Image: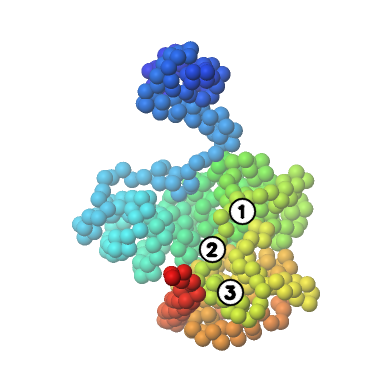
Amino acid sequence: MAAVALRRLPERLARAACEGTWKAAPSGCWSPGSGAVRHAMGGVFHARVRPQEKITLRAIRDETKLRKHAIARFNKRWRSWAQNRVRQFRLPLPVTLTSDTSLMDANYLTTCVQKAAALRKHDLKLWYGYSRRTLELRPELQPEQLGYIMWGYGKSSFLDANFFREIMPTLKEQLPSFQSHALMSTMWCMKRVKWQDKELIRACAQQVLDNIDAMRPSDFIKVTNAFAQLGLREPGLKDALSRVAIPKFEETFAQQFRDAVHPVTIGRLWSDEVTAYILERFRKIFITARPMHLMKAYESAVVCRIQSPHVWRSLSQDSKSFYVRLSQRHIPDKGREPGPMHWDVSRQLADLGEAHRNSFRWGPLYIDVGLEQLEADERRRCIMIDGPSAFYFGSDQYLPVKQLQHQLLTSLGWDVRRVRWDDWAELGNDSERKKSFLQNLIEGSRPIGEELRDRNPQTRESLQEKTRLFRGALAAAEAAEAALREKSKIDFDI
């Protein structure tokens, strides 16, 4: 665009536009030496800028500034990974998203799912229709088409338990034919919807190892992050993935490698050698990192320091100094907004007279409720609110990220108490029962370094009933809070 614009302008004007050397004369026109563009009569050039030329000149100046100060210096990537994936693997077939699903074949349906997810179409009726048609066409779907479909469901975060239960046998059957993109899409989708299927995770890990040479480095990073966050626990598979990780990381550029720095993967998957490699290399490429990458690197260093102190001691002095400085710098973060259950717990604590602080960041970790009163051993107590998103989808088993968070906080001196959504649902709308529950919860002390253990799994019917009770209790609590605010309003009408 810049070259075309320059051909339309006089040579001297174009040179001044590229170099950004205009200078405003007293009459308000151009003259060399200034970065501003003025529009009036008189001066050196005695020119009046047309609106289209004004836009062109501004574009040239902004593009020059961007190249000089952003791309060349910081090597930034301006789009997220998901957006780049949309642009890189877009299906070119022209489709109409609202077409009758009963008339769609496998290729047309795959393109519709991919396009609807890429365009962020969150129409429940549309996605339920795609789900029904996908299940009807299961025998006809090819491995690559399944990969695009799973990517679409992961991108849209559409949660349909029946769809995922029905599609899993087809995925397991065709898994030996999956290539890099399909493997990545499947595991990324499962991570996004928090779907637990240990058999499929083990099979995907073995497929990655069997086709490691054909795996794209960026896909390998996404797959291994999903393995860690979905709870891959087989020591043999974890060791095998660690052996092939460093050669795969060596094939990545800085912008791809920054996603490999993840606290859960470092704490739950990689060996000591891979952990040291990741922390050492990130120090050299941190200039390409966004705030979210810096925050994950900060938390990864804390995980390494607590879980593997010998690995931390083996790092170079420059690397250890880098992470110390990283912990002291300001990392932009939007924070977390408390949910309805969180506010309900906070109101009950306030009625009990417990001074507390809601939703704050402590180092790289988030704490839901921090109690002000110290224990006898000068430890601080905190309460973590475990809503349905803290567990696998349709389950009461904790996600590995919550278990790691609990271990870190208790190792760093916090006495952590947890309020589970299923326990809170059983209390209904009885404030006295809730206060008694919280009073019993915050009494006593917990051991340092305590692990977060799962309870015995509940049946699906029991969880569905508790989910219904939980939603009703939250709706009633929100209605009561809204009525209280309305009652406390002051009417100034005279």
Mark 1 is on which residue type? Answer: Lys
Find the residue positioned furthest to the front: 494
Work out whether residue 59 or residue 186 is closer to the camera in this orientation and state it.
59
Work out whether residue 244 or residue 465 is closer to the camera in this orientation and state it.
465
Give residue 340's position: percent from left, percent from top: 50, 71
Residue 296 numbered tag? 1
Give residue 258's position: percent from left, percent from top: 58, 46
The quadrant in which residue 136 appears is bottom left
The residues bearing labels 2 and 1 have C-alpha atoms spaced at a distance of 20 Å
Figure check: 73 above or below 294: above
The residues bearing labels 1 and 3 have C-alpha atoms spaced at a distance of 28 Å
Query: Are discs 2 and 3 less than 8 Å apart at CB?
Result: no
Q: Secondary structure at mark 1?
A: helix
The residues bearing labels 2 and 3 have C-alpha atoms spaced at a distance of 13 Å
Quadrant of the drawing holding the C terminus: bottom left
Residue 258 numbered tag? none
Q: Earlier in the sequence, mark 1 or mark 3?
A: 1
Mark 2 is on which residue type? Answer: Glu
Q: Which residue is mark 2?
A: 337
Q: Secondary structure at mark 2?
A: loop
Q: Which residue is mark 3?
A: 346
Give residue 352's position: percent from left, percent from top: 63, 81
Tell me how many marks there are: 3
Mark 2 Cα within 10 Å, few/some/many (few <14, many 20+)?
Answer: few
